[in-house]
Amino acid sequence: MHAGCLILLALTVFSAPPGTGSVGSLILAAAVDQPDLATEPLVSIARVEPGLRKPDAQLSPLPAEIPDVSPFYEVAEGKKAPFEFGASPLRSEEWGQPVGGMSGAGLEGRSPEARSRLAGDGGTDASEAAVERGLWWLAAHQRKDGSWSFDHREGLCRGLCRNPGSNTSSTAATALALAPFLGAGYTHQNGQHRQTVERGLYYLRSRAMVTSNGIDLQEGTMYAQGLAAIVLCEAYAMTGDESIKDVAQGALGFIEYAQDPKGGGWRYNPGQPGDTTVTGWQLMALKSGQMAGLHVKSPTVLLVNRFLDSVESEGGARYGYLDRTARLSTTAIGLLCRMYLGWPRSHPGLQEGVRYLDQSGPSPDDMYYNYYATQVLHHWQGSEWKRWNDRMRDTLVATQAGEGHEAGSWYFDHKHAKEGGRLYNTALAIMTLEVYYRYMPLYRESWQPH
């Protein structure tokens, strides 16, 4: 009788009433006979529709031992990194229209050939090796259910790495850890990290909740919603995997629902007056959705300008968090948003903002600011970009951990990094080093992938 009750509960789908946001049914990659992810092989998300049928393919089990994350590639003259990418299905003409009608900013640079070429336009053998070492560190700290935790000591690490984070959102941690793999061109269908990416995407799908307002991936905060939506949209864009499409589209729908209808921004909970940091992640998710050819409502995107207007100063050159009190990190976010929303390179506010970031230079410990400012300067190009890149790239290569289980990771002791810890710092550092090919420059008039 007990077994029968459990089966009935497992098959029950609970629908969320309108406007509840976080209450809903849990999307599982296999709603019936879901495997015990801690002990059994995972199903292939590429072949499973959410909650509709049983898996028909399996992956090999996770390794029982801690993977060797010691640096596998030492820079030497004439020696190249042994990258394994696999075939890429990407064609530049398949991408959707960018926000604001701007050219560039697509994902074409993540194909094997493009990455190899573009990494040489500002990157080095040492920086590319640092990217690969960082990815192996992340892979070694994935948990058995496919997720990551900001407290990276859980699972295979067994406390061998210092500086754990305190934030408890596994959705945000998993999305943030997956983003650098996609940024380097690795998906759940190709490359040496395909099983790592597949497990991570499987976990994100298991956290998705169907509501009347779209697919809720908040786990308590819109930060997680934005990060998860970015990863799902990019994974779909890079592979065309139809099993991801509906989840990605639903995640975008929830972002549209959660926007402050008056002010145009986003904050921790749906409908709250916005802040610059949460708004930046949501706009990037919408941009990723457009690049993937998914449906994004134009009024939602354009309304973000209203929020940015409320926190800008000096003609749009600087930005605050909740008001016009300018900060370096929020200025970088605000400028990047303005770029995606269509400000031309000739805009005085953008020109002055780039000059301000150039004069300020990279931070020795604030990776959040560095991550956003690097994107702004890369989109901008020119002498400002070269000055920034030389300093940022070489600093990250020099500060990457090189010994023990921490090898391949980063940690900077900044007040805003305590919650995310070493995992957060490592993911942002890798994506900063991937900037040459992760998104194509917005203001480059034309770029041919071949």
Image (cartoon, rainbow, N blue to C red):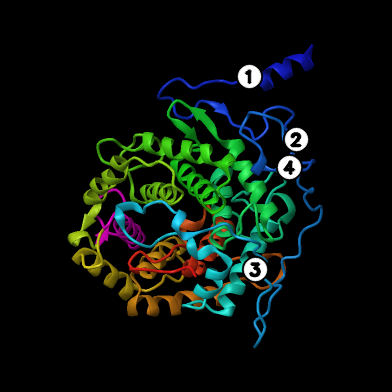
Residue under label 2, please give it. Answer: 35
Give the residues in magenta: 318-342
CA distance for labels 4 and 2: 7 Å
Residue under label 3, please give it. Answer: 133
CA distance for labels 1 and 2: 18 Å
The reply to whether residue 103 is in sight is yes
Q: Position of residue 140 (x, y in %)?
A: 70, 58
Which residue extends farthest top? 1
Q: Position of residue 125 (x, y in %)?
A: 58, 79
CA distance for labels 4 and 3: 25 Å
Residue 325 vertical position relative to residue 294 in the rendered view, above or below: below
Three-letter residue code for mark 1? Thr
Mark 3, Cα crowd under 10 Å, few <14 / some 14-19 / many 20+, is: many
CA distance for labels 4 and 1: 23 Å
> Reading the chain from its start, which is encountered first: label 1 or label 3?
1
Residue under label 1, please give it. Answer: 12
Residue 381 vertical position relative to residue 333 in the rendered view, above or below: below
Three-letter residue code for mark 3? Arg
> Reading the chain from its start, which is encountered first: label 1 or label 2?
1
Element at label 3: helix
CA distance for labels 1 and 3: 44 Å
Magenta residue check for 345: no
